Amino acid sequence: MTTPDSAEHLLPAASAAAAARNNAEWCAAVSRSGHFRDALWCSPRRTPPLYPDAVTLTPGATAAEVLAGVDTTTPGCSVKDSFAVLDLAPAGFEVLFEAQWIHRPAGAASPARGRLEWDELEAPGELAAWESAWDGDGGESTGLFHEGLLREGVVFLAGRDGSRITAGAILSTGGGVVGVSNVFAHDDADADAAWAAALDAAARHWPELPVVGYEHGEDLDTAVRAGFTALGPLRIWLHTA
């Protein structure tokens, strides 16, 4: 078992496994469904939009194990292949996108700079506004981020321009690491500040734990500027047949 003291000294492969476990625990919390097996987390019923139906936890997880734990009879099944080793094409899946696990050692971080004021959500009533800001379309909340997520080990960060939330991130513990996800900024000029705010909050709440996540494209470039290192690839598969 990874302990906080040992998590900082993980090799890249082990760090990727810790990141996968952390991400699976977060997916389970958001989905309020599923169960853990030795090689994967999976949900036999459809998970919320943008959240996978399975997350592999070891490179040894097989396609058969994944397919046995998910529902492919209804549209939308997706799988997070945490080590980019599965071939799910014969089962009717296509690669939706590829990304990189990222890792930053534990330690102090510079506070976020810029025009936004940063705070942490405390009341369930704020989750709807946070979700709307993260979604970016200004529409009504779907309840994706339910009040059960406002608990110990989870932080919702909000960057505010006056009274409006225009940037944010989520931190969640699990797997001996802190996971950072759902990082967003309406203005590209605030993107670096959003990552800095996330790292500052992680260092304040869990100073002994490294920080992990996954990103691709320009978001990966921003994470690297913030001090993260890419650990290795993952793939998201979507069932289309």
Image: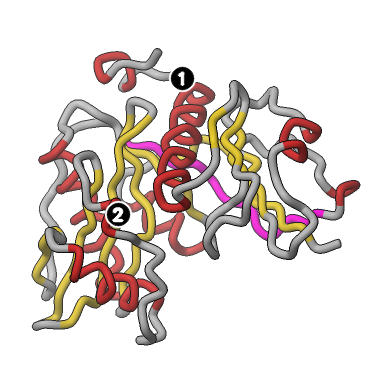
Note whether residue 49 is visible. Answer: yes
N-term mark: 1 or 2: 1
Query: Alpha-carbon neighbours of circle 2 within 10 Å: few (<14), some, or many (≥20)?
Result: some
- Report the span colored magenta: 93-104
- Residue 234 seen in the figure: no
Single out the mark in the foreground, 1 or 2: 2
Q: Secondary structure at mark 2?
A: strand
The disc label shown at residue 11, or none: 1
Does 30 sit left or right of 187 as displayed? right
What kind of residue is marked 2? Ile
Q: Nearer the viewer, residue 229 or 202?
A: 202
Left or right: 230 with respect to 145? right
Residue 230, position as x, y percentages in the image = 48, 40
Q: Quadrant of the C terminus?
A: bottom right
Residue most toward the bottom? 138
Residue 145: x, y in percent? 35, 61
For the point 38% across and 86% down, which residue is it?
139
Label 1 to label 2: alpha-carbon separation: 25 Å
The residue labelled by disc 2 is: 170
The correct choice, above or below, for 12 with respect to 194 in the image is: above
